[in-house]
Amino acid sequence: MFTSELKLTGHVSVAINGEVVQEIPNLVVTSGKDYVTSRMKDTTKGAMSHMAVGTSGTAAAAGNTTLGSEAARVSLTSSTVSGNTITYVATFSEGTGTGALTEAGILNGSSNGDLLCRTVFSVVNKGANDAMTITWTITAS
């Protein structure tokens, strides 16, 4: 009997003013897995289009459908597919998403939307004059 399990794994890199300050794994949540299988059927659900950051330190869990405490959401700067990997990039410009940030997620809406994945990390202090770029890579294996 042949069996194969599809895994979605990821890695997140957070940079402030061009300097990487965090490297963390991510969790592809249940709603994200449901989203992926839905897209295999058709395009009823829109493509991932936004990234959000927040201030909740509550651990990421498979049942998450939102961030714990969203502070800001921006449109993705880019999304690039290479083989079995997709890389999402978002930039939170000066004055956007400031404060002591501890979580991030990828969604397919400017508000609400399906949460693909969520990660929680050590505090990243983003000042009002800082630009923050998050690069999020997800690999299907």
Image: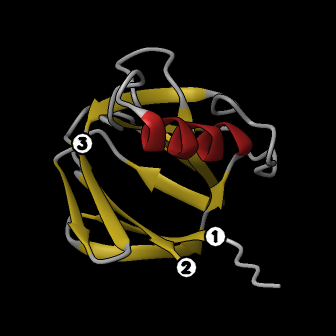
Which residue: 33% across, 65% down? 86
Q: Amino acid at mark 2?
A: Ser
Foreground: 115 or 140? 140
Q: State the separation of the CA atoms marked 3 and 1.
A: 25 Å
105 relative position to 13: left or right: right
User: Which amino acid type corresponds to the residue marked 3 in the rendered image?
Assistant: Leu
* Numbered badge on residue 76: 3
Q: Is residue 97 left or right of residue 123?
A: left
- The residue under label 1 is 6
Task: Write the residue at 76% across / 50% down.
Answer: 60
Q: Residues within 10 Å of mark 2 (few under 14, many from 20)?
A: few
Which quadrant of the figure has residue 48?
top left
Quadrant in which the N terminus is drawn? bottom right
Whichever of callouts 3 and 2 sits on the residue coming sooner in the sequence is: 3
What kind of element bears circle 2?
loop
Residue under label 2: 141
Measured from the top left, where is residue 42 in percent x and y? 39, 31
Q: Position of residue 135 (x, y in %)?
A: 33, 64
Q: Tell which circle, 2 or 1, labels the residue nearer the N-terminal end.
A: 1
The reply to whether the C-beta atoms of the residues labelled 2 and 1 are less than 8 Å apart is yes
Q: Choose between 80 and 101: the one closer to the eye.
A: 80
Residue 73 on image: x %, y %: 38, 29
Residue furthest front in the image? 1
Please, which residue is most extreme toward the top here? 111
On screen, residue 90 above or below 128: below
Residue at 81 percent of width and 38 percent of height: 63
